[in-house]
């Protein structure tokens, strides 16, 4: 699926150990990885918070209440924050905590834009810069782009010129973003599930006032995950990992792979351009909303009407994505087996769309399937 025309940088939190798996799902597409945030050895950290901070974090289910104790006649409440969520909190509320990472991103953007300035037609065939980010990492990427843009505007460059350069130089792909501050300029592709509670509450998506905050001319890809929210256990309700519709390895990356594979697209900028394409000669005497089946609903991209009911669960199974589920213990796995297909059903859906032997090809590339007893 990879044509070598892009330099892809995966921006991830230290707790995300999945970029190799994501590369294999995308048919061994090569990624560079940039860690954002600080890695922690413990599962929890003890912190001191004021009442206002406690209320805000509790409203997002990021605090675990442990116990209360009396000290000097005062009641003292003990709370814990998961270290996975601490990085998310840092990316959302603290730019200073990730200043070094932002500077690295700004340097990457500088290099990409400078190349466009020198060679606007790209006659030298230099690769195009693509930044990929999931969940809270999107906040760091968005902040770095905004900082770069502000620096250029301070140098007396016109806003339109700066945005044009960004649009030519940079493609940003977000998975389940929880950020609404994407500045205008880059070519944005936002991928999320309709039933993702975090993106619905905090992110940029079409249901959020037509994607407010997602960047001008952004492209949105949405579907429904195969997971029922009621199947999630109470053990994960205090974490960003509260629902697998927000799971990159077991949902979002497979959906992106399907869209690109179905349409024979090999680069993220080509995906963006195809989704934005408007055929000036296509004049219909019947509104497409009256069609029984409307396949083409994203520019010139073909999106099958039952991609989330059939192909997405099948792709998750074939790539071994079910082994990355956040609630994957013995007790909950029985319920997950009810929403994901078995091998025969998954093979049937994939081979019907992509031809014989595709199931084995996907499994061989991902090398994640473990035969269950």
Image (spheres, rainbow, N blue to C red):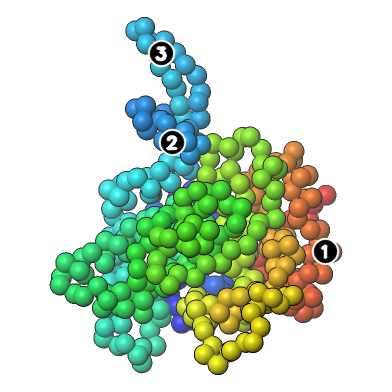
Query: Residue 231's image quarter?
Result: top right
**Residue 130 position in % (x across, y down):** 43, 71
Badge nearest the viewer, 1 or 2: 2
Measured Cα–Cα span from mark 1 to mark 3: 57 Å
Residue at which label 1 appears: 345
| Residue located beneath label 3 in the image | 75
Of residues 66 and 22, the one drawn nearer to the viewer in this rendering: 66
Q: Which quadrant of the structure image shows residue 113?
A: bottom left
Of mark 1 and mark 2, the one earlier in the sequence is: 2
Can residue 20 be seen in this snapshot? no
Label 2 environment density (alpha carbons within 10 Å; few <14, some 14–19, many ≥20): some
Name the spot of residue 166 as percent of width and height, x first.
33, 74
- The residue depicted at 34 percent of the width and 7 percent of the height is 72
Question: Which label belongs to residue 57?
Answer: 2
Are the two marked residues, 1 and 2, in contact with CB atoms closer than 8 angstroms? no
Left or right relative to 321: residue 3: left
Pointer 3 or 2: first along the chain:
2
Who comes first in sequence, dot 1 or dot 3?
A: 3
Q: Nearer the viewer, residue 133 or 159?
A: 159
Question: Mark 2: which secondary structure?
Answer: helix
């Amino acid at each position: 699926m990879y044509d070598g025309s892009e330099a892809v940088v995966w921006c991830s939190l230290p707790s995300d150990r999945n970029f190799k798996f994501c590369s294999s799902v995308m048919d061994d597409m090569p990624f560079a990885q940039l860690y954002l945030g600080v890695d922690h050895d413990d599962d929890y950290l003890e912190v001191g918070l004021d009442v206002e901070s406690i209320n805000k974090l509790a409203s997002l289910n990021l605090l675990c209440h442990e116990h209360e104790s009396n000290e000097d006649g005062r009641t003292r409440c003990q709370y814990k924050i998961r270290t996975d969520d601490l990085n998310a909190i840092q990316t959302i509320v603290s730019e200073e905590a990730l200043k070094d990472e932002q500077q690295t991103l700004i340097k990457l953007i500088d290099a990409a834009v400078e190349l466009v300035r020198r060679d606007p037609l790209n006659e030298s065939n230099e690769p195009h810069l693509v930044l990929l980010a999931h969940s809270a990492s999107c906040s760091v990427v968005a902040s770095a782009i905004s900082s770069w843009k502000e620096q250029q505007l301070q140098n007396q460059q016109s806003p339109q010129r700066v945005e044009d350069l960004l649009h030519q130089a940079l493609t940003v792909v977000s998975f389940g973003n929880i950020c609404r501050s994407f500045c205008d300029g880059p070519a944005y592709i936002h991928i999320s599930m309709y039933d993702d509670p975090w993106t619905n509450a905090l992110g940029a998506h079409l249901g959020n006032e037509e994607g407010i905050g997602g960047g001008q001319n952004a492209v949105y890809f949405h579907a429904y995950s195969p997971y029922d929210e009621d199947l999630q256990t109470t053990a994960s309700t205090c974490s960003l990992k509260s629902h697998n519709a927000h799971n990159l390895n077991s949902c979002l990356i497979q959906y992106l792979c399907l869209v690109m594979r179905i349409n024979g697209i090999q680069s993220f900028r080509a995906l963006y351009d195809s989704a934005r394409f408007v055929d000036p000669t296509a004049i219909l005497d019947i509104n497409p909303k009256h069609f029984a089946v409307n396949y083409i609903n994203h520019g010139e991209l073909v999106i099958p009407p039952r991609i989330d009911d059939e192909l997405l669960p099948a792709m998750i199974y074939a790539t071994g994505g079910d082994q990355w589920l956040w609630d994957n213990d013995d007790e909950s796995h029985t319920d997950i087996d009810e929403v994901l297909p078995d091998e025969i059903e998954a093979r049937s859906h994939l081979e019907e769309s992509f031809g014989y032997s595709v199931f084995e090809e996907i499994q061989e590339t991902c090398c994640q399937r473990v035969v269950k007893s």
